[in-house]
Image: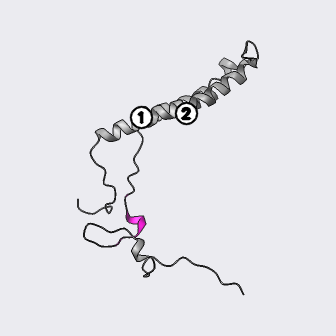
Amino acid sequence: MATQLRAPALDTPQCLPYLPRTSNGIRIPPFVVNDGVRKPSLGAALFGLIPFIAMCFSVSLWDRVYPMVLGLPFNLFWLVSWILLTPLCMWGAYVLETRARMRSPRSTHGRIRGANQ
């Protein structure tokens, strides 16, 4: 009969050195730690939606073969162009998010949820 490998429980001595500590030195399991994930700003969300809208909801505008652009039918050129422009839009969203994060007060990263702060 094959033995089953199991992860050690969070309260065993093997796991204790790896659990994060609070400012009081108390070890806490990882599901209690606030990981600092926040909602994106409106500008960043809009930057992320630009390529999606341009590729999915503008089909009636570019659904034609002619004119040919760079030897490609126009509809293929449109999709390839937006695939190449998507990283530029994501970079713009990243820049907006990092600027918003710099302006906002420090997050509660690493603190226990619901604890008095």
Q: Considering only vertical position in the picture, is 69 above or below 92?
A: above
Name the residue: 29% across, 67% down: 22
Most distant residue in the top direction: 67
Tell me the residue that label 1 is attached to: 95
- Tag 1: amino acid: Val
Crowdedness near tag 2: few (<14), some (14–19) or many (≥20) residues, C-alpha within 10 Å: few
Which residue occupies the foreground of this view, 11 or 49? 11
Magenta stretch containing residue 46, yes or no? Answer: no
The spot of residue 26 in percent (x, y) is 30, 73
Q: Considering only vertical position in the picture, is 108 above or below 66?
A: below
Decide which of tag 2 and tag 1 comes sooner along the chain.
2
Magenta stretch containing residue 29, yes or no? Answer: yes
Crowdedness near tag 1: few (<14), some (14–19) or many (≥20) residues, C-alpha within 10 Å: few
Residue 70 location, quadrant: top right
Which residue occupies the foreground of this view, 59 or 25? 25
The answer to whether residue 59 is left or right of residue 25 is right
Tags 2 and 1 in contact by the CB under 8 Å rule? no
Name the residue: 51% across, 79% down: 8
The spot of residue 95 in percent (x, y) is 42, 34
Q: Quarter holding the N terminus?
A: bottom right
Chief SS of the magenta region: loop
The residue range painted magenta reads: 27-34
Q: CA distance from mark 2 to mark 1?
A: 12 Å
- Tag 2: amino acid: Pro
Name the residue: 61% across, 27% down: 82
Mark 2: which secondary structure? helix
Residue 57 location, quadrant: top right
- Residue 9 is labelled as none
Tell me the residue that label 2 is attached to: 87
